Image (spheres, rainbow, N blue to C red):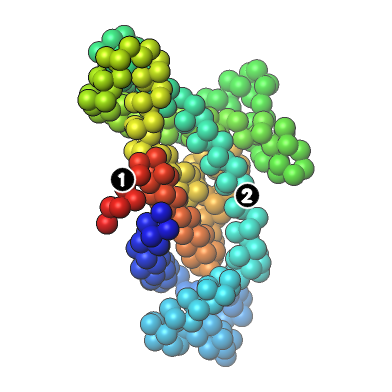
Amino acid sequence: MTRFILRRLLIAIPTVILISVFVFLLQKLLPGDPVLALAGEERDPETLAFLREKYRLNDPLPMQYLYWAQAALQGDLGISLRTRQPVLELIGEKLPVTLQLAVMSLTVAVAIGAPMGVLAAVKKGTFWDWIANAVALSGLSIPNFWLGIMLILLVSVNLGWLPASGYRPLSEDFWQSIRTMLMPAFVLGTGLAAALMRHTRSAMLGVLRMDYVRTARAKGLSERRVILRHALRNALGPVVTVSALLFGELLAGAVLTEQIFTIPGFGKAIVDAVFNRDYAVVQGVVLVTALAFIAMNLLADVAQALLNPRLRDAP
């Protein structure tokens, strides 16, 4: 198992380096001059020359990347141009919000998508299979922003059950924080549940055709035990991988949902940073979310290896 994890880590290292290069270069393609944004109203040549020298913007591009990468490895992702706050500190404030939303959304997705996928596979070709596929298609088709607005109108404005927007940290008021996150988590979770349901159904259909499932039924085991203990466990590999990838997408920030419900997470932070040409924040947030996505892929590989020991010996 240790060798398996080390192999995956060795694959992840060059991926991280390539991502850091892309993040750095793509930032250079953003419109506008960061020096002009830093200088504010002091646009005299001396001030501009001082800032270019201070931030090494006169150096060749490869040298600029090396200086930036070296600082990033030391935990220095720069300073926000708008708030003058260290980017790492800003990320530390936004990350718990995004993590809470991601965990709650994935919980909703798994609670809806996985049981529906199993039911659709077991009841293939029946009314229940049709219902599950119709719900999945609806989840993929309904835009998040429309569903969010409709939920605010119904649940908050008409019924008054949940707050329409805003965010309260878990440390301040646990239950109020959960209440403010329920609607955005449901909006995101229903869309993810549709994808999760389709993958679960496909994986279960493949497993149910296996010889060992037929053998288990021939031995007289109950259908419930065959499905839950034999089929579902072996079908979990692809489902775990998809769940990890979906969680990585959530960590990247749900831009529209966070905007609608005024949630101060990664999605809202990066939109505000792009509009304000806050280049250091854009770089920092994109780099952290990319690293989180790689970490979730690694965890998915490890989880699959735990579920299927044959994968541990795979190259």
Query: What residue would you read off at disc 1?
Result: 310
Eyeballing the image, is 213 above or below 24?
above
**Residue 140 drawn at (x, y percent):** 36, 30
Residue 299: give its label: none
Q: Say few, some or many: other residues with alpha carbon within 10 Å of mark 1 (under 14 / 14 to 19 / 20 or more).
A: few
The structure residue drawn at horizontal position 47% and vertical position 30%, both measured from the top left corner, is 110
Residues marked 2 and 1 touching at CB (< 8 Å)? no
Residue 96: give its label: 2
Q: Amino acid at mark 2?
A: Pro
Identify which residue, 192 or 111, lies in the foreground.
111
Identify which residue, 77 or 45, lies in the foreground.
77
**Residue 216 drawn at (x, y percent):** 30, 19
Answer left or right for 89 relative to 209. Answer: right
Identify which residue, 276 or 11, lies in the foreground.
11
Residue 154 seen in this snapshot: yes
Task: Please identify the residue farthest to the top as the structure is shown.
Answer: 127
Callout 1 secondary element:
helix
The earlier-in-sequence mark between 2 and 1 is 2
Callout 2 secondary element:
helix
The structure residue drawn at horizontal position 53% and vertical position 82%, both measured from the top left corner, is 55
Residue 143 seen in this snapshot: no
Task: Please identify the residue farthest to the right as the structure is shown.
Answer: 172
The structure residue drawn at horizontal position 54% and vertical position 77%, both measured from the top left corner, is 71
Q: Amino acid at mark 1?
A: Arg
Q: Quadrant of the C terminus?
A: bottom left
Eyeballing the image, is 289 above or below 167?
below
Nearest to viewer (mark 2 / mark 1) = 1
Q: Quadrant of the N terminus?
A: bottom left
**Residue 92 drawn at (x, y percent):** 63, 58
Dividing the picture into quarters, in which one does residue 38 lie?
bottom right
Answer left or right for 44 relative to 240. Answer: right
